[in-house]
Image (cartoon, helix red, strand yellow):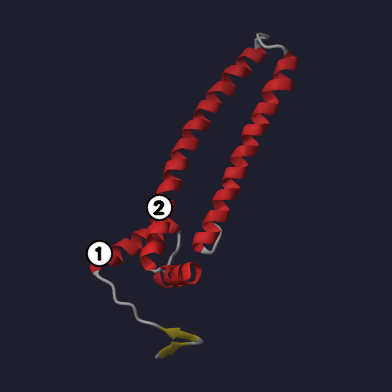
Amino acid sequence: MTRHGNRIIRKVYVTEDEDRYFKILQEKCHIRSFSSFARRAMLYFGNYGNYFVIEACNRHCELMEERSKELSAIGNNFNQIAHQVNIFALQGKIPEEYYTDVILPAIEKVQSIYKQIQNDDEKIKKKLYGHDS
């Protein structure tokens, strides 16, 4: 067993395919070193085995990409609606009370939900990867 400072060096042998896969996962997970990636995987997932760690990280990344695309589309639609509502409000086609009593609270609710989604994502990332990204 060799040491580097106060750390013990462990060797892990991987195939070229595994090495490429780990590099992809590290990039997706925003983890710079394989050593850090492996430590987090082993510490946070204990006895479940590396296969399950890799699958969990991979699935999480896929889900986050899908959710990001969906949220982006929803946000785009929401912005288009808000733009039209603002035009109608400026043109006097929507009563001011409706704008302040109905539309603004709806916008605030959507913003609150979006913020909660972001917070939930950060909690998931912290649990999976051991840090905020």
Task: Sort mark 2 into few (<14), some (14-19) or many (20+) by Cα contacts within 10 Å.
Answer: few
Choose the circle earlier in sequence order: 1 or 2: 1
The N terminus, quarter of image: bottom left
Residue 133: x, y in percent?
A: 53, 56
Residue 22: x, y in percent?
A: 34, 64
Residue 68: x, y in percent?
A: 47, 41
- For the point 45% across and 47% down, the residue is 64
- For the point 44% across and 38% down, the residue is 69
Q: Secondary structure at mark 1?
A: helix
Q: In which quarter of the view is residue 3 placed?
A: bottom left
Q: Residue furthest front?
A: 47
The dot on residue 59 is: 2
User: What type is the residue that disc 1 sits on?
Assistant: Asp
User: What type is the residue that disc 2 sits on?
Assistant: Arg
The residue tagged 1 is: 17
Q: Is residue 35 above or below residue 83?
A: below
Return the residue nearer the eye: 116 or 72.
116
Residue 88: x, y in percent?
A: 62, 13
